[in-house]
Image (cartoon, rainbow, N blue to C red):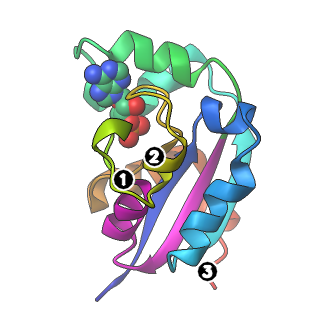
Amino acid sequence: MAVERTLSMIKPDGVSRDIIGEVLSFFEKGGLKIVAMKMLRLTKQQAEEFYIVHKGKPFYDELTDYMSSGPIVALVLEGEDAIAKCRKIMGATDPAEADEGTIRKTFALSKGENTVHGSDSPESAAREIAFFFSELEICPR
Ligand code: CMP
């Protein structure tokens, strides 16, 4: 299986509840390596740009308001099959549908306040990683 990189975020509900370390542990214990990480607060405009693929959907405004409501942690995860692995570790978007033992089943509050984001394809991963990080800020291990 190919070694991939994926972009993940710990969303404002995760940062504000002080579960950053616990969320990172799920990824590390799940076999993914953190190769870049930063905390920042998105502006509404930056959140709109990041989630541009969802523009026009009924939840776009709520989503971008929420994602700019407080600090987030952006991270690049690396490992074999990292995109699918990250999504498995996160669980389904809606915590009510997420499997036991996943981040969202454990921590998410709702479909919107669902604690984490993970890229959904190699194309999204490349775009989303470049949104937050320059190549210099990524440390292959
Ligand atoms: P994420 O993985 O960050 O990608 C898009 C986000 O949109 C998703 O997680 C959810 O948090 C959010 N989302 C998807 N569907 C809905 C919805 N019906 N209502 C509110 N937010 C949603």
Which is more N-terminal, label 2 or label 1?
Answer: 1
Which is more N-terminal, label 2 or label 3?
Answer: 2
The residue under label 3 is which amino acid type? Pro
Q: What residue would you read off at disc 2?
A: 104
The residue nearer to you, when weighing 131 against 88, is: 88
Side of 31 where 75 appears, left or right: right
Residue 50 picture location, percent across and down: 44, 33
Disc 1 crowd, CA 10 A, few/some/many (<14, 14-19, 20+): many
The residue under label 2 is which amino acid type? Arg
Please tell me whether mark 2 sits on a helix, a strand or a loop: helix
Please tell me whether mark 1 sits on a helix, a strand or a loop: loop
The residue under label 1 is which amino acid type? Gly
At 71% from the left edge and 49% from the top edge, which residue is drawn? 20
Query: Closer to the observer: label 1 or label 3?
Result: 1
Disc 2 crowd, CA 10 A, few/some/many (<14, 14-19, 20+): many
Q: Quick check: is 83 in the magenta stretch?
A: yes
At 33% from the left edge and 37% from the top edge, which residue is drawn? 96
Q: What residue would you read off at disc 3?
A: 140
Q: Which mark is residue 91?
A: 1
Q: CA distance from mark 1 to mark 2?
A: 6 Å
Do the numbered discs 1 and 2 sit on residues whose CB atoms are within 8 Å?
A: yes
In the rendered image, the residue lying farthest to the bottom is: 1
Q: Quick check: is 25 in the magenta stretch?
A: no
Q: CA distance from mark 1 to mark 3?
A: 26 Å
